[in-house]
Image (cartoon, rainbow, N blue to C red):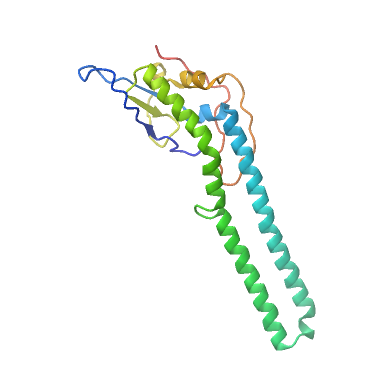
Amino acid sequence: MKKGLFFVLLCSVYLTSPARAQKFGYVDSEFILGKMPEYQKALSEIDKFADKWSKDIQDKYLEIEKLQKAYQAEEILLTEDMKRERQRVLVDKEREAREYNNKVFGYQGLLFEKKKELMKAPMELISRAIEKVAVQKKLEFVFDKASDFVMLYTNPRHDYTDYVMEELGLDANSKPTKPTAAPGAPVNNSPENKTTTKPK
């Protein structure tokens, strides 16, 4: 999954007095996502859109290739005006193909927007589950072990991943499916045999 997904989820659950030490915990969002059917379904949908758009782009370039071959075969028979017109058509077709490719796979293109749309539901499910666990366990802060935030050491007793998975109705010991991710899509690289220790 994409790094920095949660970075730091700050749950403002001020249920303890300021005099007491603030309680914190962490979760592994990558591991959780890897077990979620909603996430696997989203990846499959992203694959479908990416495959369709890739085929559309490939078809455009195949059409250009056919036009180029036809032009080369007939070039000797064409007048200068006809040559210029054929060349203009080829240039326009190539520009259209590049623009469409950028529109789909470029920065914040159609694939990016589709991933954001399809990933919204599983992200919200995790976020709500984390917040609920934070309230139940009276945590002031919940960090994401899978984020870009560097955690040099993590004590397993502060790991609340299993609680979040229970809240989502997921089995920590089940093996997640591994659909092929679309280009640039979040990748499920969660460890399959990970076990976590519930903090007390």
Q: Is residue 146 left or right of residue 139?
A: right
Q: Is residue 87 above or below residue 60?
A: below
Total numbered badges shown on the rendered structure: 0
Residue drawn at the location 69% of the way across and 54% of the way down: 55
Q: Is residue 188 left or right of residue 126?
A: right
In the picture, the quarter occupied by the C terminus is: top left
Residue at 62% x, 23% y is 175
Q: In the displayed structure, does residue 31 sit left or right of residue 43? A: left
Residue 179 image position (x, y, % from top left) = 64, 35
Looking at the picture, does residue 22 appear above or below residue 101? above
Image coordinates for residue 13, horizontal then vertical, percent: 32, 23
Residue lying at the far top in this picture: please name it. Answer: 200
Question: Residue farthest to the left?
Answer: 19
Whether residue 23 is situated above or below residue 6 in the rendered picture: above
| Residue 9 placement: quadrant | top left
Does residue 190 appear left or right of residue 8 in this picture?
right
For the question of whether residue 27 can be seen, the reply is no
The residue lying at 43 percent from left, 38 percent from top is 4
Q: Nearer the viewer, residue 132 or 143?
A: 132
Q: Position of residue 169 (x, y in %)?
A: 55, 20
Taking depth in this image into account, of 180 and 96 the one nearest to the observer is 96
Asked if one can make out residue 137 in the rendered structure from this viewpoint, the answer is: yes
Residue 31: x and y in percent read 52, 27
Q: Is residue 35 above or below residue 100?
A: above
Residue sitting at 46 percent across and 24 percent down?
A: 129
